[in-house]
Image (tube, rainbow, N blue to C red):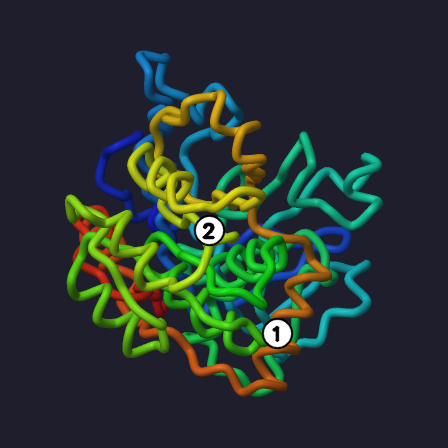
Amino acid sequence: MKSFRVTGFGQPLTEQDRPTPELSGTQVLLRVKAAGICHSDLHIWEGGYELGHGRKRLSLQDRGVALPLTMGHESVGEIVAAGPDAKDAKIGETVLVYPWIGCGQCDVCKAGDENMCLKPRFLGVYCDGGYSDELIVPHPRYLLSLDGLDPVTAAPYACSGLTTYAALKKLDLGETIVIFGAGGLGLMALTLLKAMGGKGAIMVDIDAKKREAAEQAGALASVDGGAADALEQIVAKAGSPIRGVLDLVGNAQTAQLGFDCLTKGGKLVIVGLFGGGAPWALPFIPMKAITIQGSYVGNLRETQELLDLVRTKKIPPIPVTPVPLNQADAALHDLQKGKLVGRAILTP
């Protein structure tokens, strides 16, 4: 198998050709058709997260991310082989890979929330993922039939789609919400919000092109988060008290602005992992009775719900840019520099 791997944090991806391992047990081999490049991949590639307030940088190596590693957790592939115990694998079927795999033994995993497992085996994070022409998945239960959906545009549903779907479920969508970040996740959130019966969203981003893309995707309005009067603009364009904010960026500035625009009893759901430290004055949390909740991807059941929603509501895909596998490193740098609108998708 040919893969582009992280062999040193912050270093260029390394092309490696390795023999395809012999399958055992319930393992399934896929020929990769599409692999999304996610903003989380930047943190994996860089090796950690900034925690702010002078704290030591969070090291992913200390948290069990070992190199060399093939990234890629938004993968679609064709099943080409299966181990002797992978009875449900259908050779020739094109599937979306659920990458948020846990230990399978703890109470959390047995309850169906493998994404919350304390001993994760996430593909593309702790185990090799989709920046490759082949991918091994440990069990066919993590493979979801695309049933006619396009592999390239469907790949982001494994993370971008699932993450925003699970986060939106935590908010009251009957009222106007505010969404910070109009990149791949933000555009995905807009398309899902409408399909989920939501009233609509005001999109906040510092990039004019991304704000334009958000308005074209159906945003009620957009605001430059870097403007001196951004808070006043958000409140004015909402037209009523804001009770729900979804922060897909997750830095000190967006967290503060999201907190500030909420009315009493509001909820701030944080998804983004950009980094930094919490900026809020603590007394205002109880005084405003604010709920601050994190949301981390989603479970396998929610992934199937999402795919069913996409088919039933005929949800249009977010903008994607197909990229040859051998340009994975360049695409990663383009994402780092903020040059991409929507998602770059590797197409081996």
Q: How many residues crowd around disc 2 within 10 Å: few (fewer than 14), some, or many (20 or more)?
A: many
In depth, the one of 20 and 191 nearer the eye is 191
N-term mark: 2 or 1: 2
The residue to which callout 2 is attached is 245
| Nearest the eye: 73 or 171 | 171
Which quarter of the picture shows residue 168?
Answer: bottom right
Image spot of residue 179 (x, y percent): 40, 56
Relative placement, left or right, of 258 versus 126 is left
Q: Which mark is residue 79?
A: none
Indicate which disc residue 307 carries: 1
Report the amino acid beneath label 1: Leu
Q: Is residue 117 left or right of residue 248?
A: right
At 15% from the left and 62% from the top, the residue drawn is: 208
Work out whether residue 206 can be spotted.
yes
Distance of mark 2 from mark 1, alpha carbons? 24 Å
**Does residue 201 sit above or below 37 in this rendering?**
below
Asked whether the viewer can see residue 1, the reply is no
Q: Residue at x 58, y 85 (%)?
A: 313
